[in-house]
Image (cartoon, rainbow, N blue to C red):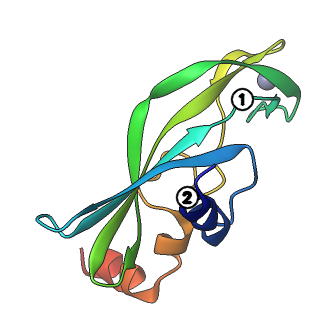
């Protein structure tokens, strides 16, 4: 594994179930895109907490993360879906964001986000 990508994985606090596939820097759009990939293995059903096998991967989506210096930083990933024997196919929770959120947990923890929501 690329050492820099592995450093990014550790900086993001992700365990080895996730791989940092690439970190792309766009000088033009002042943006850093961190592409994450689920490596497979057992998953936990989000409804019942049962251990399941992976069914497939949901379509790619993005989450806004904390800026890297002055660059907007985006997580990009296909969330794994589990094949739960009780509930069927379910999209699992990702470690960096709450359900249905477009922002990472770290981004949401920033006070300025609270002010922005309050002003809206
Ligand atoms: Zn289930």
Kindly report the distance in space between the C-alpha atoms of the residues bearing marks 1 and 2: 18 Å
Q: Residue at 47% of width from left, 83% of height from top?
A: 110
28 displayed left or right of 9 = left
As drawn, 72 above or below 33: below
Q: How crowded is the residue under tag 2: few (<14 C-alpha within 10 Å), some, or many (20+)?
A: some
Q: Residue at 69% of width from left, 58% of height from top?
A: 14
82 displayed left or right of 61 = right
Question: Residue at the right extreme?
Answer: 50
Q: Position of residue 65 (x, y in %)?
A: 43, 66
Residue under label 2: 5
Q: What label sits on residue 11 in the rendered view?
A: none
Q: Residue at 88% of width from left, 29% of height from top?
A: 50
Residue 115 lies in quadrant? bottom left
Q: Residue at 50% of width from left, 62% of height from top?
A: 104
Residue under label 1: 40
As drawn, 9 above or below 114: above
Q: Position of residue 90 (x, y in %)?
A: 65, 23
* Labels 1 and 2: the sequence-earlier one: 2
Residue 60 lies in quadrant? top left
Numbered disc 1: secondary structure: loop
Q: Position of residue 11 (x, y in %)?
A: 62, 71
As drawn, 108 above or below 54: below
Numbered disc 2: secondary structure: helix
Between marks 1 and 2 in the image, the one whose residue lies nearer the viewer: 2
Residue 43 lies in quadrant? top right
Q: Position of residue 72 (x, y in %)?
A: 29, 70
As drawn, 112 above or below 26: below
Quarter holding the C terminus is bottom left
Asked if the residue under mark 2 is in contact with the one under mark 1, i.e. CB atoms within 8 Å, the reply is no
């Amino acid at each position: 594994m690329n050492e820099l990508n592995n450093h990014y994985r550790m900086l993001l606090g992700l365990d080895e179930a996730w791989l940092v596939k690439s970190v792309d820097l766009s000088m033009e759009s002042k943006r850093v895109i961190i592409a994450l990939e689920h490596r497979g293995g057992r998953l936990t059903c989000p409804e019942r907490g049962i251990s399941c096998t992976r069914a497939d991967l949901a379509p790619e989506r993005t989450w806004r993360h904390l800026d890297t210096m002055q660059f907007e930083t985006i997580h990009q990933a296909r969330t794994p879906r589990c094949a739960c024997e009780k509930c069927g196919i379910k999209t699992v929770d990702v470690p960096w964001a709450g359900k249905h959120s477009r922002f990472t947990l770290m981004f949401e923890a920033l006070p300025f986000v609270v002010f922005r929501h309050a002003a809206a």
